[in-house]
Image (cartoon, rainbow, N blue to C red):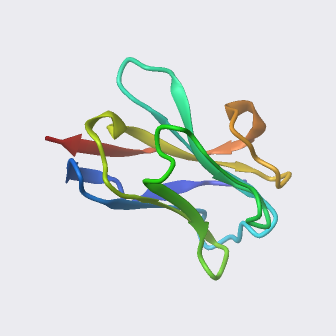
Amino acid sequence: QAHLVESGGGVVQAGGSLSLSCSDSGRTFADSAVGWFRRAPGKEREFVASINWNGLRIYYSDSVRGRFTISRNGAKDAVLLQMTNLELQDTAVYYCAEDSGGYGGTKYYQYNNWGQGTQVTVSS
């Protein structure tokens, strides 16, 4: 059974950078799509970024486009979310999610496996 784990969260000042990683005990994501979502306090879960199985389809939300980059590592056993120029409104719990069908997308229901989340806090 899939057990996604997010890592790399923490506290960073506004304007700083963080890099999140999503992995599952070395299992490869070669055939899966992976998405990142976030939930800020008092708000609904929000799509952040996704990458499909072959890396040719990448989506970003308008709020992070140009600042965040989603990618796979060379071994394809992790998906990274590099976050730069972080803003106060980026503070949230970040979740990675897997679509084992390979396509992913921007909707939470397109994913069948979810991690527990990692906290990202941006301070002023």
| Residue at 54% across, 31% down | 46
Q: Residue at x 74, y 41 (%)?
A: 112
In the displayed structure image, the side of residue 88 where residue 106 appears, left or right = right
Q: Position of residue 83 (x, y in %)?
A: 40, 56
Residue 119 falls left or right of residue 75: left
Q: Is residue 96 above or below residue 23?
A: above
In the picture shown, does residue 27 fall above or below 18?
below
Q: Is residue 16 visible?
A: yes
Q: Nearer the viewer, residue 28 or 74?
A: 74
Q: Pick the residue in front: 89 or 31.
A: 89
The extreme top residue here reads 42
On the image, which quarter does residue 76 sit in? bottom right
Quadrant of image for the C terminus: top left
The residue at the point 40 percent across, 38 percent down is: 93
At which x and y percent is residue 82? 44, 61
Residue 23, image x, y percentages: 57, 63
Q: Residue furthest bottom?
A: 74
